[in-house]
Image (spheres, grey):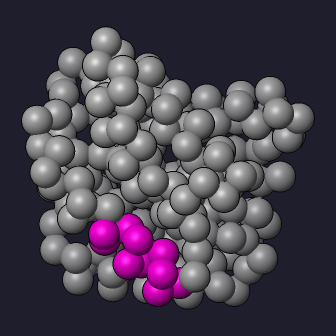
Amino acid sequence: MRVLFIGNSHTYYNDMPKMFKDICAENGIDVQITLLSKGGMGFDYHADNQQTRFNILYGDYDYVILQHVAHPMGEFSVMEEAADRIMEWVAQTRAKACFYMTWTMEGDEASQPEMSARYRKLADKYGCLVAPVGEKWWEHIHKHPETDLYYEDRRHASIEGSRLAARIIFETLFTSVS
């Protein structure tokens, strides 16, 4: 199986795609990972990048995981317009798209519903999956306050946070948790 991760630091921190690959291996699924990421960039950056287009169209992927800039997310119209362009390429392949919903900064849980709604709106528009990492993030914090999911900057994931993200993406793809 081939999986393409497209995102930014919330995707590449702690080598999260490798964590995802390890979870797949533990479950008997052989996965090849490709990562296209640049810190602080969203769908608009990737939609303008020929490397993104080429990888989607010719990489023979089973899944394309898409993560937009998180802090701040910016205007929804920018996110949606760029997602439209990216999803045009995905539609030309056999790949299934999955939006990787991120989490809000520490202390800003009240913004999670808006962030979640944006990812869910796009997933509904394209009939694809959404990995509800941001929602599961806050559930985990409430159930396990002793576990720090945040890195020192209080925006990115700690190793534990990246493991949670990898697990939620795995569950979304293979057990339809979303």
Q: Main secondary structure of the magenta part?
A: helix
Queried whether the magenta region covers residue 96, the answer comes back as no
Quadrant in the picture for the C terminus: bottom right
Q: Decide if residue 154 is on the left or right side of residue 172.
A: left
The residue lying furthest to the front in this view is 143
Q: Decide if residue 113 is on the left or right side of residue 172.
A: left
Q: Position of residue 170 (x, y in %)?
A: 65, 44
- In the rendered view, would you say 124 is above or below 137? below
Which corner quadrant of the image does residue 17 belong to?
A: top right
Residue 52 seen in the figure? yes
How many numbered marks have been drawn onto this rendered protein structure?
0
Q: Position of residue 89 (x, y in %)?
A: 60, 82
The residue lying furthest to the top in this view is 146
Q: Residue at x 12, y 43 (%)?
A: 108
Q: Position of residue 56 (x, y in %)?
A: 64, 70
User: Which portion, as a residue range, is magenta?
Assistant: 117-126
Q: Residue at x 23, y 83 (%)?
A: 77
Give whichever of 54, 41 is nearer the camera: 41
Q: Residue at x 72, y 71 (%)?
A: 95
- In the rendered view, would you say 175 is above or below 145? below
Which corner quadrant of the image does residue 75 belong to?
A: bottom left
Q: Position of residue 117 (x, y in %)?
A: 30, 69
Q: Decide if residue 26 is on the left or right side of residue 43.
A: right
